């Protein structure tokens, strides 16, 4: 038989206190620093890409304004001559004056083709793009609206998809 005095001397099991959450172990400091550095690196890359492609966003917005003006006016006379100027300005911003400023005609179109991974202008659109600046009013008045829309789409694809030089 168990004696009553013995039972009175028994105590509950005493559990140790839980380990503290702070300060963490040194491994957590190292992991936190690595996560912070990787996050900063990702943000820096994102900011640099965004800054580098700022001209591209501006050119696409300008193209939208030109196309909207063309649809409202229904006349290519004021809108079409602005397309080659827009492409040249975007190319100057992307590739620099030395590489772009002296190009014209077929040499200019070959340069534009070389900046894309695949051909972006068909033969009809190439001729139309070259003649945008110099076509007379009667020639521009006779242009097919579908071919003008295709030219706008081709210019948009070049602005959005051309490769930047590898050194930048």
Image (cartoon, rainbow, N blue to C red):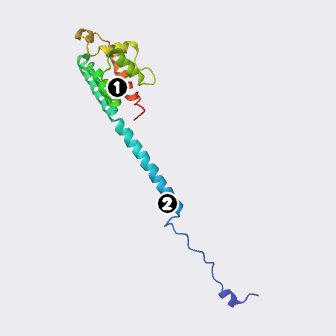
Task: Note whether residue 127 is visible.
Answer: yes
- Quadrant where the C terminus is found in the figure: top left
Looking at the image, residue 60 lies above or below residue 46: above
Q: Is residue 42 above or below residue 117?
A: below
Residue located beneath label 1 in the image: 99
Task: Look at mark 2 in the image and give the residue it sits on.
Answer: 29
> Which one is earlier in the sequence, the residue at label 2 or at label 1?
2
Q: CA distance from mark 2 to mark 1?
A: 49 Å
Quarter location, residue 157: top left
Residue at 56 percent of width and 73 percent of height: 17
Q: Quadrant of the N terminus?
A: bottom right
Image point (51%, 60%), residue name: 28
Q: Secondary structure at mark 1?
A: helix
Residue 18 vs residue 151: left or right?
Answer: right
Where does residue 26 sit, x and y in percent of width and height?
A: 52, 63
> Which label number is shown at residue 43?
none
In this view, the residue farthest toward the front is 98
Q: Nearer the viewer, residue 31 or 93?
A: 93
Residue 50 placed where, x, y %?
Answer: 36, 39
Which residue does the image show at 51% across and 56% down from the upper left?
Answer: 31
Callout 2 environment at 10 Å: few (<14), some (14 to 19), or many (20+)? few
Number of numbered tags placed on the structure image: 2
Residues tagged 2 and 1 counted as in contact (Cβ below 8 A): no
From what the image shows, is residue 5 above or below residue 120? below
Which SS class for mark 2? helix
The residue drawn where x is 27% and y is 24% is 66
- For residue 166, what is the image quadrant? top left
Q: Using the image as rendered, state which of residue 107 and residue 90 is in the foreground.
A: 107
Q: Nearer the viewer, mark 2 or mark 1?
A: 1
Q: Is residue 144 left or right of residue 1?
A: left
């Amino acid at each position: 038989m168990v004696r009553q005095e013995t039972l009175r001397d028994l105590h509950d099991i005493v559990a140790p206190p839980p380990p503290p959450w702070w300060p963490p172990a040194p491994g957590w400091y190292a992991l936190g620093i690595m996560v912070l550095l990787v996050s900063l690196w990702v943000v820096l890359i994102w900011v640099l890409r965004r800054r580098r492609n700022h001209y591209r966003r501006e050119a696409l917005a300008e193209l939208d304004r030109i196309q909207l003006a063309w649809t409202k006016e229904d006349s290519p006379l004021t809108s079409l001559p602005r397309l080659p100027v827009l492409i040249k300005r975007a190319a100057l911003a992307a590739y620099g004056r030395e590489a772009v400023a002296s190009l014209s005609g077929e040499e200019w179109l070959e340069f534009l083709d070389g900046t894309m991974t695949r051909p972006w202008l068909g033969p009809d659109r190439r001729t139309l793009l070259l003649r945008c600046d110099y076509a007379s009013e009667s020639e521009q008045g006779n242009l097919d609206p579908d071919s003008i829309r295709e030219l706008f789409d081709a210019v948009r694809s070049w602005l959005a998809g051309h490769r930047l030089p590898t050194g930048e």
